Image (tube, grey):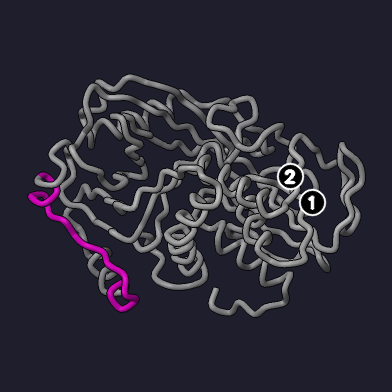
Amino acid sequence: MGCGVVGATIAYELSKVPDLEITVVDAQPTPVQADLQECPTATGAALGVLMGAISKKEKGRNLRMRLFGIQYYNDVVPELEALTGRSIPFNREGILMLQFSDDLEVWKRLIEVRRKQDLTLEIWDQDRLQSEFPFLDRATAAIYSPCDRQINPVALTQALIEGAKLRGVNFQFGTKVLGRQGNQLQTSQGILESDYLVISAGVGTSGIETSINIRPVLGQAIQVRLAKPLGDRPFPVITGDDVHLVSIGNSEYWIGATVEFPTEAGEVLPPDRAMFDQVMRQAIEFCPSLKDAEPIRTWFGLRPRPQGRPAPIIEELEPNVLLATGHYRNGVLLAPATAAHVRAKILQIDLAEL
């Protein structure tokens, strides 16, 4: 139930298991699209920035899930492209996190932690930063993570769906879930029986499982075009003060994203122009060339944020009913580990390393 990037990854991984018959239902009329603004989704809103080593989490399950996800995409993107014939834009140049103060002690400690984990982080001083990327401004230093990644979430999800279809998975888009009793779903297309039910419906989870409180957090982003590229070679995702600049080729870039919380009652407010403008101002501050950028499109989506508990929610709700939802801002990054957990639960395999 649910076919954003998390549901699609689960379906694709389960499609590799012999003797499983898999049906995926989703209320959206089509698989996720880049410009489907009347049905904003978390996957459609995402920029696909995959922060693993550069995350400040030093250890624990969340870090393991992050690193698992990055390695998964390193391996599976070529597999998916060969299987489906689709191209999946995948930036392997890493992530460059700009610093705007001289206090780097936290990063020096993390670099040592990562070294012991066989992961690389580098501190770039201002001279190195200007030498590599002269179009940047204001930053006094940067942290570079060569092993982190960025992936196009829509292209990825569409390829996962196509790959799962080729392996026999049945997708029912435009199918609304009206109710649930045990493993049985009542849908707009009739009753669906199952041995296992996996709920990966994001913000739609609360509408079916009222005991699970997941609130929508809106995010806005923009795609822009410059008269000429910022650089003459591929470069990493550049992030400063939680604003991301993602090169997508042809002198075009993604910039985002806002974080806009709902009301206390859970009501989603319209996209806030002031917050959007603030994100653009921050991006222009560290990359002044963006002030001359031509807007191509803007978009927004709703991220699923669990209330009163950490994201994501991956657990058994009741016998043979599994929750795999509430990934908030890390659905793309954590989808592979989530799928591994679901697969292990269904096959009754110990997955202690995750």
Distance of label 1 from label 2 (alpha carbons): 22 Å
Query: Is residue 167 depicted above or below 246 in this figure?
Result: below
Q: Which residue is mark 2?
A: 171
Question: Which residue is located at x 26 percent, y 27 percent?
Answer: 290
Disc 2 secondary structure class: strand
Give the position of the C terminus as an image quadrant. bottom right
Q: Nearer the viewer, residue 262 or 292?
A: 292
| In this rendering, the label closer to the viewer, 1 or 2 | 2
Residue type at the position of mark 2: Phe
Q: Amino acid at mark 1?
A: Glu
Question: Which portion, as a residue range, is magenta?
Answer: 114-130
Whether residue 7 appears in this view of the structure is no
Give residue 152's mark: none
Location of mark 1 (residue): 209
Q: Quadrant of residue 26?
A: top right
Is residue 29 visible in the rendered structure shown here?
A: yes
Where disc 1 sits, the SS reads loop
